[in-house]
Image (cartoon, rainbow, N blue to C red):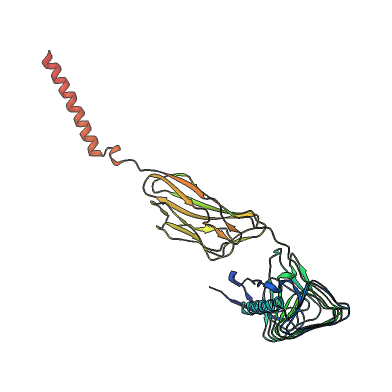
Amino acid sequence: MKIQCKYFSLLVGTGFVVLLYAPFLTWAATAPDLGQANSFGVLAGSAVTNTGPTVIVGDLGVSPDTSVTGFPPGIVIGAIHSADAVAGGAQSDVTIAYSILAGQACNTTISADLGGTTLIPGVYCSASSMGLTGTLTLDAQGNPNAVFIFQIGSTLTTASNSSVRLINGAQSCNVFWQIGSSATLGTDTTFIGNMLALTSITLTTGASVDGRALARNGAVTLDSNAVTVPACSLSPAPITPTLGKAFSPATTNAGAVSTLTITLSNPDTAPAILATPLTDTLPSGLVIATPPNVGTTCGGGPPPVAVAGGSTVTLPAGRSIPANGSCTLTVDVTAAIGGSYTDTLLANALMTSNGNNAGPAVATLTVIPPLAAASIPTLSEWAMIMLAGLLVLFGVAGIRRHAR
């Protein structure tokens, strides 16, 4: 279930207001697959026109129109596709990607100008236009796979000498601008990201794009620009978490309490978020004590669950294991009958954003049974024993008298 938590309006810079909604896990921005459009730096629906020494590193295409003018003097370090099957397929894939971008849940609404702000990964939206005057900084917070999506109801416009800056691992291939009508980049703008515009895209003199200019229906107009198709560096595969468990004490009397500790370890450099609940089912005869004293040091929420007399303890989804660290889930347990109780969490019991545990976690609790009732005589039983002893003594004495 998606949870939206509306916060207070926040004034960031002059004239910039955001209504911030705290994103839940399912709100993470997702990069669409550009398909055949992936190789295109410029793609238009009606025409591509150029003035001056524009350089496009990547393919250039137009579909369904055929018009491409201004090359040369412009240079395409790639292929030019004019109304061919490749350009048509690329336009189809742009349409699909555009719809995917437009359909993602908005967790931050923006009004006024983006200049002078720093944004973290997420989906940012405006029902009307977006403008950029100055510098917009995109902070990936150390995650090279972080995605930034801007949903724009009408136009995107940048002022002269404006720029988009990436920090802390952000990559241009993971920045997307879904534009409801047209985009215009001002002179000498340094722009980053993939522009997918419903109508047209205009790059004025000296503007550069580390990304793509993809116009579905209208023209792409160029003037002494540089457009470079980005290539994301692949982040290393995350190191999967591990599980461990132990009873303390490991040996108890029947009816006594032992604390079960489940340790979740994360050797990766990124926190591991539980994708599904972690549930440990106790072996038969071992139950949650009264009170359960259930607790966790794992971050986030909601709280862990254990019911006195029950047989399960659960750490809910959404809890996190710190990067290069560990956390614990603890609960008190007890058994009324003596025996050896082996508690096992199987491989893949812990499912996280960094993968699943590869091996099982096993711990054994030894419970000493109560002394059998017959092993300690009662008071009446002691009296019978003494009487029997006396009778034996009298009998022996009587035998000795007769023998004389």
- Residue 256 drawn at (x, y percent): 42, 48
Query: How many numbered discs sit on the rendered protein?
Result: 0
Question: Which quadrant is home to the C terminus?
Answer: top left
- At horizontal 54% and vertical 50% (from top left) the residue drawn is 359
- Residue 396 drawn at (x, y percent): 17, 21
Q: Is residue 345 above or below residue 381?
A: below
Q: Is residue 359 left or right of residue 389?
A: right
Does residue 151 show up? yes
Does residue 156 show up? no
Q: Nearer the viewer, residue 227 or 333?
A: 227
- Give the quadrant of residue 401: top left
Q: Nearer the viewer, residue 400 or 108?
A: 108
Q: Nearer the viewer, residue 320 or 333?
A: 320
- Give the quadrant of residue 160: bottom right
Spot the residue most to the left.
Answer: 402
Q: Is residue 243 left or right of residue 47?
A: left
